[in-house]
Image (spheres, helix red, strand yellow):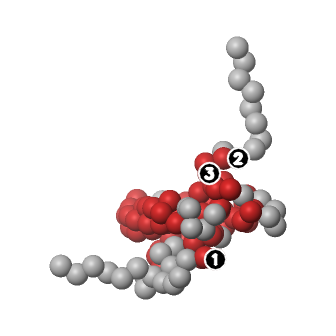
């Protein structure tokens, strides 16, 4: 049985990108993550906020989990990329470091 390839993005990936963008649009500051690149890549059309899975109240917990997880991963990936070295990794690391600096004040640091 042959598997057909589709050119459409994965539904879960699109939903995640839209929730990350929605975080900036409907959640009160300070924002945990500033990311609308996925929204631009998905190009869902003007009515994307009318989708049932984009209800601001019903998805608030999911949205919070998605952006917190992304922020956590970004905070761990950037230093690892910088340590890894290599030209292509360095340029990605510089981009992550810039994003990290932009987000540095977004999440209060926990002191113990």
**Disc 3: which residue:** 13
Does dot 3 land on a helix, a strand or a loop?
helix
Q: Nearer the viewer, mark 2 or mark 1?
A: 1
Say if residue 81 shows up in the picture: no
Is disc 2 placed on a helix, strand or loop? Answer: loop
The residue that appears at 62% across and 51% down in the rendered structure is 13
Q: Nearer the viewer, residue 92 or 105?
A: 105
Could you tell me how far apart the alpha carbons at marks 3 and 2 are, in whole angstroms?
A: 7 Å
Image coordinates for residue 53, horizontal then vertical, percent:
64, 56
Q: Are marks 3 and 2 in contact (CB under 8 Å)?
A: yes
Could you tell me residue 21's position as x and y percent?
63, 69
Q: Earlier in the sequence, mark 3 or mark 1?
A: 3
| Location of residue 10 by image quarter | top right
Crowdedness near tag 1: few (<14), some (14–19) or many (≥20) residues, C-alpha within 10 Å:
few
How many marks the image carries: the answer is: 3
Which percent across, then down, holds residue 68?
Answer: 44, 66
Residue 84, above or below 35: above
Q: Give me the C-alpha separation between circle 2 and circle 1.
A: 23 Å
Disc number for residue 25: 1
Left or right side of 105 for 6: right
9 up-or-down from 104: above or below: above
> Quick check: can you spot residue 71?
yes
Which numbered dot is residue 9? 2
Query: How far apart are the alpha carbons under marks 3 and 1?
Result: 19 Å
Q: Residue at x 60, y 63 (%)?
A: 19
Q: Which mark is residue 3?
A: none
Q: Is residue 11 above or below residue 68?
A: above
């Amino acid at each position: 049985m042959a598997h057909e390839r589709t050119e459409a993005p994965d539904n879960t990936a699109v939903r995640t990108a839209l929730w990350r963008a929605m975080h900036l649009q409907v959640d009160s500051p300070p924002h945990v993550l500033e990311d609308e690149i996925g929204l631009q890549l998905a190009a869902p059309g003007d009515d994307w906020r009318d989708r049932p899975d984009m209800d601001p109240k019903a998805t608030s917990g999911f949205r919070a989990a998605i952006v917190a997880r992304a922020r956590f991963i970004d905070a761990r990936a950037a230093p690892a990329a910088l340590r890894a070295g290599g030209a292509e990794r360095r340029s990605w690391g510089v981009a992550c470091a810039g994003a990290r600096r932009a987000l540095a004040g977004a999440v209060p640091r926990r002191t113990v």
